[in-house]
Image (cartoon, grey):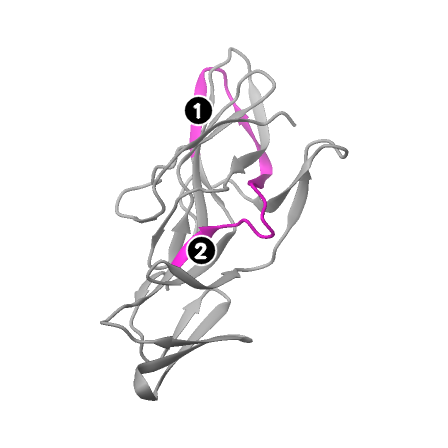
Amino acid sequence: MFGEHELKTQFIKIADKKIHLLEDKGGLVRYRREEFEAIIKKNNGEKLRVLPAPALGYGVRLLMIKFREPLVIPPKDAIAGFVEAPVEVDVKIGDLTIDHFILGREKYALYGAIEAGVICRYHVSPFYTEEPEAIGVAKLIVSNPSPEWKSLERVVVPIKGTSMYYEKTKAYYPLLLVTLKNHSPEVNNTGRPPKEGLNAVGKGLSLPNFLMRW
């Protein structure tokens, strides 16, 4: 699924989508996905790369993940876990993106006040203590440094320009650190892989200190 694929006749399945490669005369390969088609000229063994991309949709900057059940964290304590997260797909030859598509169903929500809020991608997920089988996953560590009990119903993550990570069958957002500060949780997209052994897409830059004011 994710990773490099030879330019030869084959099907590549990514979740609910299917890419069809068909070799043709003259060193050409026909690329087809649903109604989209492209003709690729082979070049020195260059391979097709199928890579995960953040769920930007129509150009949003934020991803809101609502927990199916709220998290309740004791004072001076923390919890680590996982959520399912929507992802998109870039198909590249060299540095050129020849196709981009969304996996699954798109959902959006308003983050903030009606008169001044922003549209963000929206997803509802259980909170897992072990990594789920979903194609898109985010690991987060939620800490409560305060002397009081705290609850958290959702997390809003900056994803514009984020790195991504992958193995053959799954895509990962960078490790997310959520600190329950007073009335505004702080979200840090660390840019770091959530576990060892993953392939990287992007430069691993962090997107820190996002305050969830709403």
Of callouts 2 and 1, which one flags the residue occurring earlier in the amino acid sequence?
1
Mark 2 residue type: Ile
- Amino acid type, mark 1: Ala
The residue sitting at 44% across, 55% down in the picture is 135
Return the residue at label 2. 135
x and y percentages locating residue 87 in the rendered image: 49, 53
Asked if 75 appears above or below 67 in the picture, the reply is: above
- Kindly report which numbered mark, 2 or 1, lies closer to the viewer in this rendering: 2
Magenta stretch containing residue 76, yes or no?
yes
Element under label 1? strand
In x, y percent, where is residue 60?
A: 59, 45
Relative to 56, does residue 3 appear above or below in the rendering? below
Left or right for 42, reference 75 = left
Q: Which residues are magenta?
A: 51-80
Farthest left residue in view: 44
**Is 91 situated above or below 183?**
below
Query: Taking 77 as reference, is 110 above or below it?
Result: below
Check disc 1 and report the residue beneath it: 78
**In the image, farthest residue toward the bottom:** 25
